[in-house]
Image (cartoon, grey):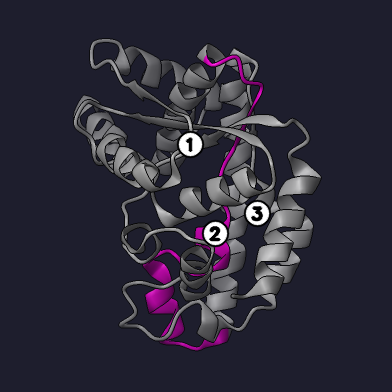
Amino acid sequence: MNDQLLKQMQNAIKETVLEKKIGIAFSGGVDSSLTAKICSDLGYQVILLTIGFEGSHDILFSKKINEFLKLPHQTLEINEKNFNEISKKINQKINTDNLSWNENCIAFYYVSKLAKKMNLNSVVTGNGIDELFCGYNAYRDAIKNGELKVQELMNLKLDNELKMMKAVNNISSEFGIRIIQPLLSEIFINYAKKIPVSQKIKNSDDLIRKHIIRKLASDIGLPEVCANQRKKALQYGSLIHKALIKSR
């Protein structure tokens, strides 16, 4: 086990997550599952929160993974009838044409709505793992041109993610919910950037990536189907991307 990585993730959570009863934005993927497992092991009272349209991958897969985690789990199925109205309201509030920002803000609108229903104040996410550990497919192109290009892309991705999560919190504030990203804290970012790129991505043919994260997930007891499976991002797994494109 990479004890140092686990310790740094634990510290990042303990320093940013001050309430003991928390929600976890949960899709069943390695990032959210690892975050949930670490929080639970640290003694937090965790409630998994999953959103998506009826029959979406995230709704189904999250239930499958929680058969192993066995944590309290709540789901919210998005209502197709008022989706367009809500998506337009969110677009006006964050005032950007960035599709990814709109999709994520819509997703966290529903996560926050579910969190409020569960009488929670805070929702913890695994955001930052894809940026810091080469989770995105774009890192496969970057590695072709060397590790410096990987680092440059990482900085761009981190800058975008930090700004986007401010927009997300602007949306979640409607429900009085704070969305917390422990793995986007300055201390954890500085630590993760020092981990060799070779432990994150092997080469341009690397379809899996995030190797050190996946190894840690396996080591602390997450099932193989979670730790080493590729999974669509939140906006795709929940079918929000498909619905938003259809509405335009």
The magenta segment: 118-147
Q: Amino acid at mark 1?
A: Leu
Find residue 71 and name its label. 1
Residue beneath disc 2: 129
Is 186 colored magenta in this rendering?
A: no
Q: Report the residue at 24% width, 34% height from top.
A: 245
Q: Is residue 176 left or right of residue 105?
A: right
Let me know if residue 122 appears in the view: yes
Q: Earlier in the sequence, mark 1 or mark 3?
A: 1
- Is residue 166 shown above or below 36? above
Alpha carbon separation for disc pair 1 and 3: 22 Å
Asked whether 125 or 45 is in front, the reply is 45
Name the mark nearer the viewer: 1 or 3.
1
Find residue 183 and name its label. 3
Name the mark nearer the viewer: 1 or 2.
1
Mark 3 Cα-neighbour bin, 10 Å: few <14, some 14–19, many ≥20: many
Mark 1 Cα-neighbour bin, 10 Å: few <14, some 14–19, many ≥20: some
Q: Report the residue at 59% width, 75% height from top.
A: 1
Q: Earlier in the sequence, mark 1 or mark 2?
A: 1
Q: Report the residue at 62% width, 29% height from top.
A: 169
Q: Amino acid at mark 2?
A: Ile
In the picture, which quadrant includes the C terminus? Answer: top left
Find residue 162 and name its label. none
Secondary structure state at the residue bearing disc 2 = helix
Secondary structure state at the residue bearing disc 1 = loop
